[in-house]
Image: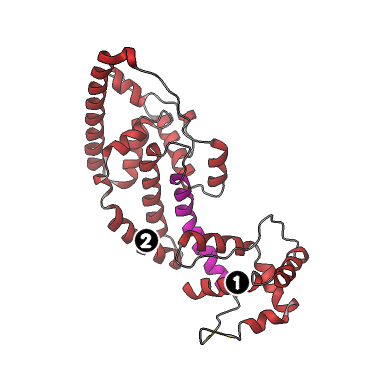
Amino acid sequence: MNDSIVRIRNAVQYVRSSPSRLQKFRNGIEHERIESQSIVVLDVPTRWNSTYLMLSTALKFQKAFDRLLEDDGCYGLYFSELDSGKKRVGPPKDDDWGNAKVFVQFLHVFYDITLKFSASLSVTSNMFFHELCSIATELSTLANSGDFLLCEMAVAMNSKFDKYWGKIEDVNKLLIIALVLDPRYKLDYVKFCFGDLFDENKVNEMTYDIKELLIKLYQFYNGVDNISSSDQVSRSIPLENEGDMGKVNENVDFRLERLKKFKKMKEKKDFVDLKNEVERDWNATSSDDMVVG
C-alpha cells in the first residue's frame, strides 16, 4: 500500500513541478474528456488527511496520468532519475490505482467526521457519540469484509481506536446526554446505537444509567429554573448548516443506512404510556425528523 501511495505521489509531483508539465497534463485531461473543476494537489506525507485529498483527487485523473506515458517522454524518464540516491518509484500502475481506491474508501469515513468536528460555527457535542458509534460500526463492518486489504487496515485501525478511546461504555455520559437532547434522535436512537455495539444486558444497563443521569440533571436544572426563571434568556443556536453538511456527506451512506434501520424500528415499535415529563421529552421524536449529521 505504501509503495502505491509513493508512486502516485511522485506522479503528482511531476505534474506540479512546472507550468509546462501541468499544461501537458491538462491537455491529457481534455483529450480524455475528464470533467472536473479540480486539479491534482500535493500532499504532506506525514498528514493522513492531506494524503487522502491527494489520492482522491488523483484518482479522478487516472486516465490522464496513463496518457502522459504516451504524450510526454520526460514523464517516463522522470522515474529513472535518482531521488536522494535511490531510483524514483513509479509511475503508478493499475494495481497502484486499485490500492488507492481502497485506501480512499477507508479514509473517507474518518475525513468526513474530522471535517464535522472541525466546524467552528456549529454545535458538535451532540454529534460526538453518534459519530463515535459510526466509526466503531464501520470498522467492525470493514474488518469482516471480503476485501483483504480493507480488512487488514480496519483491524489495525480498530486496535488504535480502542487504545485511544478505551471502552465506549467509559465515554463521558454527558456526551451521550447531548445526543439524547438533540430533538432529531432522543433516547430511542441512543439505545439503538448501543444495540449495534453491545449485547442486550449491556444495552439495558447503559440505557438505565443514561436515564438516571438525565433525571438527575432534569431535577437539578428544574430547581435552578424555579429559583431564577425571571433571569433566563432563551437563545436559539443552529445545530448545523445543512447545505455545508450535505456537501461533506454526499459520498458517505453508512450513517444514513443506520438511520434508515432506526426509522424502520420506530415504525414497528409499540409505544407505551410515558410516566413523567422527562421521559415524554426524551422519547418524543418523529422518525421523519431523522437526518444524517
In magenta, the rendered stretch is 95-118
Image quarter of residue 206: top left
Q: Residue at x 67, y 79 (%)?
A: 75
- Residue placed most toward the observer, 55 or 87: 87
**Residue 58 percent coordinates (x, y):** 61, 64
Q: Position of residue 4 (x, y in %)?
A: 52, 73
The residue lying at 39 percent from left, 60 percent from top is 143
Residue 157 is tagged as: 2
Q: Majority secondary structure of the magenta segment?
A: helix
Residue drawn where x is 61% and y is 86% of the image: 80
Q: Amino acid at mark 1?
A: Gln
Question: Could you classify mark 2 by the number of other residues whose Cα lies within 10 Å: few (under 14), some (14-19), or many (20 or more)?
Answer: some
Instruction: Please tell me whether residue 75 belongs to the stretch shown in magenta.
Output: no
Report helix, strand or loop for mark 1: helix
Q: Position of residue 214 (x, y in %)?
A: 26, 28
Say if 216 sits above or below 275 in the image. below
Residue at 36 percent of width and 64 percent of height:
156
